[in-house]
Image: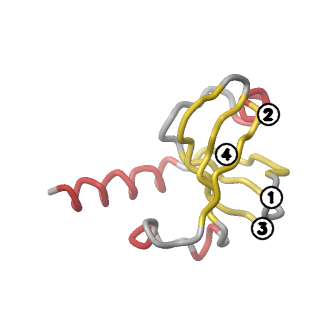
Amino acid sequence: MKSFAAVDRIEGPYTICELEMCPAEISNVADFFTKETIMIGIPIADIYNAIGNFREGDILVVEHDGNKVTTIYSKDEEEKQRRIELIKKIIG
């Protein structure tokens, strides 16, 4: 399944991401507090080799099988901006 993964933090050689358990094309940014997600570790090198530089807060488009990320496609700057705007709206 192709989904969004939000980069949460770096721990040792891993990037800890919040992986959505729904397809990216039906992901609803306004519902990102209630949709099913899991925390998953992805090797930093895998992300860097696929897309280059990245940082905490980036939104990645990935392919996964529900347990493991198999492909990292890109960063999604539009999705990142939608989430930033929603957070700004929520906190006022």
Question: In 3D space, how far apart are the residues under numbered discs 3 and 1 (Cα atoms)?
Answer: 11 Å
Q: Nearer the viewer, mark 3 or mark 4?
A: 3
Q: In the image as oriented, which residue stretches furthest toward the top?
A: 12
Question: In 3D space, how far apart are the residues under numbered discs 2 and 1 (Cα atoms)?
Answer: 16 Å
Q: Position of residue 87 (x, y in %)?
A: 30, 55
Which residue corresponds to mark 2? 46
Taking the spot 48% from the left edge, 40% from the top edge, the residue there is 57
SS at mark 1 in the image: loop
- How many residues crowd around disc 1 within 10 Å: few (fewer than 14), some, or many (20 or more)? few
In the image, what residue type sits under mark 4? Ser
Which quarter of the figure has residue 36?
Answer: bottom right
Is label 3 in contact with label 2 (beta carbons under 8 Å)?
no
Taking the spot 73% from the left edge, 48% from the top edge, the residue there is 73
Q: Position of residue 33 (x, y in %)?
A: 43, 66
Q: Nearer the viewer, mark 2 or mark 4?
A: 2
Q: Quadrant of the C terminus?
A: bottom left
Taking the spot 65% from the left edge, 72% from the top edge, the residue there is 22
SS at mark 3 in the image: loop
- Residue 1 tag number: 3
Q: Of residues 8 and 86, which is closer to you in this image? A: 8
Q: Is residue 44 left or right of residue 75?
A: right
The answer to which of marks 3 and 4 sits earlier in the sequence is 3
Which residue corresponds to mark 1? 67
In the image, what residue type sits under mark 2? Asp
Is label 4 in contact with label 1 (beta carbons under 8 Å)?
no
In the image, what residue type sits under mark 1? Asn
In the image, what residue type sits under mark 3? Met
Which residue corresponds to mark 4? 74
Q: Is residue 84 left or right of residue 4?
A: left
- How many residues crowd around disc 2 within 10 Å: few (fewer than 14), some, or many (20 or more)? some
